Image (spheres, grey):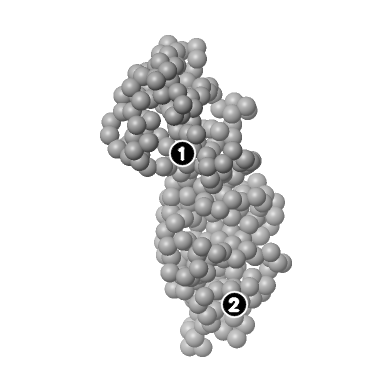
Amino acid sequence: MPTIFLFRDPGSEVGQQAEAALREASTTLRGSIVFALASDKNEPIQQQLFHELALENLEPSDFPTTRLVYRSTRSHQHRQYMDVKARKYRIDAGYGARACPPVTSPDHYRSFVYQYSKGMIKAYQRSEPLPVYYGNEPVVQAVGSNFQELVLNSPQDVLVDFYAPWCGHCRKFEPIYQSLGESLKPLRNTLRIVKIDATQNEVPVQITGFPTILLYPAGKKDTPVEFRQQRTVPVLTKFLKAHCTNPLTLSQEDPNARWQGLSPDEL
């Protein structure tokens, strides 16, 4: 069952007004949705919820605020990564199909539930801001909001490194992955090398360890292949050659074919 969370300061007047409005609305909506109260403080007890709903960077003036969460299963577990089965909704900042009364009015919650039940609100996802792209990046930095475009909708084979900034193995792998991207730059029309911070961006795959390296072959994006071998450029290149849809070959006349010491024969 979906849950509406009200994040408010219980000691403030506006927080108390919002809570009273929620309680009044719940008397008529009970049974169709769960209502939950939460603090507007990013405290340890609810840090993961703040993180998952992308609330930790909001200003104090942004509260009280509401979010609706629907989880398709009761058995979800996550730490620094996202519950990919959850769908999150907000009705402010243009996410609703029509204007909604303020959170201090019971009609806010009635409108929220109505628009959600009618499919009038689009789900949102946690995402870092879009990076600036120059077109010659050896490794493309993806974020949650463009993962679909860069990876799943791309006609290319796409290799993705799902990393965590605090992960020592990820930091050790970073220069190797960068070198791989430089080596394969001449194949950018058929092969894309991508990385994404899986602790700050939602992706449509459950990440349980870092780094996780997945190849999304062209034409078979729904069946990614996980790389679980030694993390070196030659081994990664061999893996790509074995699993990419497009041939991992370079023209002998390509002036860039020897970047980073990889010749066409080595590819």
Which comes before the other along the chain, label 2 or label 1? 1
> In which image quadrant can residue 91 be found?
top left
Task: Say which residue label 1 marks.
Answer: 88
Q: Nearer the viewer, residue 79 or 25?
A: 25
**Mark drawn on residue 131:** none
Badge 2 element: helix
Residue 60 versus residue 209 in the image, above or below: above
Badge 1 element: strand
**Mark drawn on residue 241:** 2
Residue at x 38%, y 30% (from the top left corner): 113
Q: What residue type is disc 2 on?
A: Lys
Q: CA distance from mark 2 to mark 1?
A: 38 Å
Q: Position of residue 90 (x, y in %)?
A: 40, 35
Q: Quadrant of the C terminus?
A: bottom right
Can residue 262 be seen from the camera position used here? yes
Residue at x 56%, y 27% (from the top left corner): 42
